[in-house]
Amino acid sequence: MFAVHAYGGMKALRQGLVPTLVVSFSMSIALWFIAQWEPTLATFLSGIVGMLVTALLARAKVFNTEEAINASFSSTVLSNTPNPNPGAKGKVVTKKLPFNLAFAPYYSLIVIVLLVKFIPGVEDWLKGLLVLKLKFGEYSTGLGWVTPAGSSTSVGIFSHAGAFLVYASIVGMLIYRAKGVWKPGMFKAVLSKVVKGGVSSSIATTSMVLMAFMMVESGMTYTLAKGVANAFGSIYPIFIPLVGVLGAFMTGSNTNSNVMFGAFQVQIAKILGISTLISAAAQTAGGSIGSMLAPSKVIVGTSTVGLTGREGEVIGKTLKYCVTLALILGVIAWCMLFILYKHVY
């Protein structure tokens, strides 16, 4: 609803309320059901459901009336204001593949996940092929914080969610090769682009993960959490999503926001005696909506639609929506923690 309002104000919101609710509920319902059997793919698959529902609604005559079309042209979007960089242009996208063929790797991913999850014994077999698990001895800091001996979480190399992406990529390449789309030498070019696009983000993510673990294992996260819990007390849950927003703004993604502040939120929840699950959910919800303020994502969006150089305006216009939504989520989290689900830990 905020996105529609940002596009065309209250007039657009009134006209687009029904399709907005239909898309929202379809994604929410899909998210809930998918999360029951495979949480790691819940947001991905529910996003696809939202895209499909949106495409169907866009074809419906009831939403393509003359009034709706005229309203779209008169909306108060950034493109109606003077452009300080008139020479900037967006990317021109040329259709090269039919939709189903272009979507083949995603179809493959869905099929692979369904096969692994619903064929008895397949997932257990994959989990037993190669397992990574590290053991660590006890150690303590100079200030006396003791971390007991233990081991890391077991990771099945062939059953991990990342492995499913590799399987889907291989199937996609085979399909493209059979259709004559995959030419000799393309693998090297694709691999080069993957490495070029992934190295910087991988280094950043790995560094933040290491920093987060060092802070947790050395007691720094607990010390910070204790100070915040003592300062804010029971009203702190209202601000949990805002911390997630801050993390996404600083790091550029929800994942990195959770890496940076996830353990911090859990520690505060333990100190306050409230649900760590709900607190973590509020953190990641805040990080998710905070992505709209992340400079890296805003730059990609503005360059695509021909608004290069106007990133500050975009962030300024979306800031009020982001903060308002984060506070709404915070109030919902507080009600869940102290009224509705006090028994959940």
Image (cartoon, helix red, strand yellow):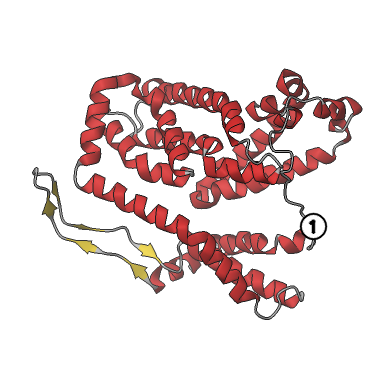
In the rendered image, the vertical position of residue 216 relative to residue 9, given as above or below: below
Location of residue 120 with respect to 68 vertically, above or below:
below
Image x and y of residue 57, in percent: 79, 38
Can you say whether 291 is above or below 8 in the image? below
Q: Position of residue 222 (x, y in %)?
A: 22, 37
25 relative position to 149: left or right: right
Query: Tag count in the figure?
Result: 1
Left or right of 205 in this view: 234: left
Mark 1 sits on what residue?
Answer: 94
Which residue is farthest bottom?
A: 184
Find numbered disc 1 in the image and state the secondary structure of the residue it sits on: loop
Instruction: Confirm whether residue 270 shows in the render.
Output: yes
In the picture, the quarter occupied by the C terminus is top left
Q: Could you say where residue 221 lies in the image, as x and y percent from the top left?
A: 25, 39
Residue 27, quarter of picture: top right
Q: Position of residue 302 (x, y in %)?
A: 65, 41
Depth check: 124 or 131 in front? 131
At 34% from the left and 23% from the top, the residue drawn is: 236
- Within 10 Å of the Cα at label 1, are there few (<14), some (14-19), or many (20+) other Cα atoms? few
On the picture, is 327 further left or further right than 231? Answer: right
In this view, the residue in front, 89 or 147, is 89
Toward the viewer: 315 or 34?
315
| Image quarter in which the N terminus is found | top right
Residue in the picture at 54% in, 67% down: 166
- As drawn, the residue found furthest toward the right would be 66
Q: Amino acid at mark 1?
A: Thr
Q: Is residue 119 visible?
A: no
Q: Quadrant of residue 64?
A: top right
